[in-house]
Image: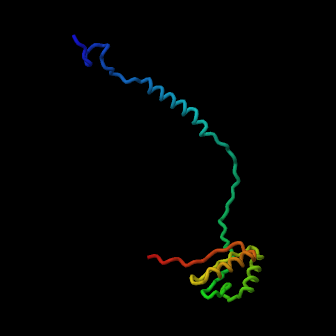
């Protein structure tokens, strides 16, 4: 009689059980990993920190508005100044404590060279904080 793959013979029959050995090995390895790492996660140092209440600083820094008009005219806080007066006022502002921030408002039609001259004078005079003021574009 010929043996078929699905015969009832014990030597050639299919295995009906799941092999649990690899599953048990994986579970034991995971158990060891968790047992080793959990104490390391819970380790901490208890210290008694000082308590203080603080409020955010609401001090506004002083600033100076310097407008450069389209024709090159300079306005220091709304008052017209020439180049010599500008250098004198920059030097005075540079020695103030705290030093004010220079807000430069340049007309879009002014020559770049004029704005560069103003920036150069501010740097040479000792003003270290400078910002440019622009008008936001309308949303639409």
Residue 113: name its quadrant.
bottom right
Residue at (75%, 77%) from the top-left corner? 125
Nearer-the-camera pick, 23 or 67: 67
**In the rendering, at what x and y percent does residue 28 appear?**
50, 27
x, y percentage for residue 8? 26, 15
- 11, above or below 34, in the image: above
Residue 108: where, in percent of width, then height?
57, 82
- Residue 96, given in percent of the width and then of the height, sits at 76, 76
Asked whether, in this view, residue 30 is left or right of residue 95, the answer is left
Residue at 62% from the left image edge and 80% from the top image edge: 112
Left or right placement of residue 27 versus residue 133 in this view: left
Q: Is residue 9 shown above or below 119? A: above
Which quadrant of the figure contains the N terminus? top left
The single residue placed furthest to the left in the displayed view is: 1
Residue found at the very far top of the displayed protein: 1
| Total numbered badges shown on the rendered structure | 0
Dividing the picture into quarters, in which one does residue 70 lie? bottom right
Q: From the viewer's side, name the closer residue of 4 and 20.
A: 4
Check the image and report above or below for 18 versus 63.
Answer: above
- In the figure, 39 relative to 100: above or below? above
Q: What residue is drawn where x is 64% and y is 79%?
A: 104
Q: Which quadrant is the C terminus positioned in?
A: bottom left
């Amino acid at each position: 009689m010929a043996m078929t793959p699905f015969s009832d013979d014990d030597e050639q029959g299919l295995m009906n059980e799941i092999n649990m050995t690899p599953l048990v090995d994986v579970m034991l390895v995971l158990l060891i990993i968790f047992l080793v790492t959990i104490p390391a996660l819970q380790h901490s140092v208890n210290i008694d920190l000082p308590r203080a209440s603080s409020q955010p600083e609401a001090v506004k820094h002083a600033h100076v508005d310097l407008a450069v008009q389209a024709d090159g005219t300079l306005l220091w806080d709304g008052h017209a100044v020439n180049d010599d007066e500008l250098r004198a006022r920059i030097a005075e502002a540079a020695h103030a404590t705290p030093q004010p921030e220079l807000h430069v408002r340049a007309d879009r039609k002014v020559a770049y060279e004029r704005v560069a001259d103003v920036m150069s004078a501010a740097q040479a005079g000792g003003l270290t904080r400078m910002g440019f003021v622009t008008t936001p574009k309308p949303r639409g």
